[in-house]
Amino acid sequence: LFPLDLHASLLVIYGHLFNCFDDALVIAAARSRSRSVIINPYKQPLLGAMLHLSYAGPCLSDEIATVNAYHFWQRRRQTQNEKEWCLSKGLSLPALKEVHDMVMQLRQVGSKMGLCLPPGHAEKGRRLEDKLKAVELLAASDADECVTVSLGLEKTATATELA
């Protein structure tokens, strides 16, 4: 159902299972594209390797470098001249935009499968929604003597208090 090859689709499913869905989407989207999000200047392989290492960190992983570069761009993408900013940081704006479009497409498919919220919704909303569902389940149950639930709001309540 994902518009990906088998291995990339499995990566996305495992990303959901291991609570790293967003990063798995970025990796799968980047692997489905032929261009890297990190610039590798022609005739300057050492510069390309240094740029790659700066995004990969100590793990030296291509995938981690891609995820870090994508998230770095995401946090700062509304700069005045995005193209110049990307070039100064060693990032390919066209490749980043392709990966972003693919991530949004994969999020849309994932939301239809119940794996995530549709594009544009914050993950905080998902976590709060899951906590509220847990509260509703506890409130509906009769075993409320010892059961407590943390709402993430610096307050703990029993099922009786919530009902």
Image: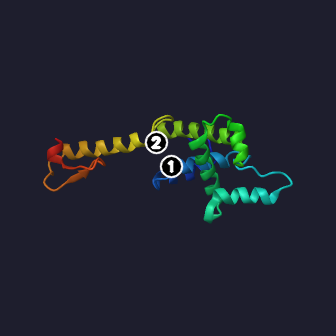
Label 1, secondary structure: give it: helix
Q: Amino acid at mark 2?
A: Cys
- Classify the position of the C terminus by image quarter: top left
Q: Is residue 93 left or right of residue 134?
A: right
Q: Quadrant of the N terminus?
A: top right
Q: Residue at x 35, y 42 (%)?
A: 128
| Coordinates of residue 21 in the picture (x, y in percent) | 50, 49
Residue 84 location in percent, x, y?
A: 72, 39
As drawn, the label of residue 21 is 1
Q: Nearer the viewer, residue 77 or 144?
A: 77
At a point 72% along the width and 49% down the height, the residue shown is 90
Q: Identify the residue at horizontal 47%, vertical 40% (top origin).
A: 113
Give the percent coordinates (x, y) of residue 112.
Answer: 48, 36
Q: Residue drawn at (51%, 52%), measured in percent from left and top?
A: 15
Q: Residues within 10 Å of mark 2 (few under 14, many from 20)?
A: many
**In the structure shown, which secondary structural element does the residue marked by tag 2 occupy?**
loop
The one of 85 and 66 positioned closer to us in this rendering:
85
The disc label shown at residue 116, or none: 2
User: Residue 101: x and y, percent?
Assistant: 62, 37
Question: Which residue is situated farthest in the bottom direction here?
Answer: 58
Q: How many marks?
A: 2
Disc 2 + disc 1, Cβ < 8 Å: yes
State the colouring used for the structure image: rainbow
Q: Quadrant of residue 146?
A: bottom left
Precedes in sequence: disc 2 or disc 1: 1
Q: Which mark is residue 100?
A: none
Query: In the depicted view, which residue is nearer to us: 2 or 160?
Result: 160
User: What's the amino acid at mark 1?
Assistant: Phe
How crowded is the residue under tag 1: few (<14 C-alpha within 10 Å), some, or many (20+)? many
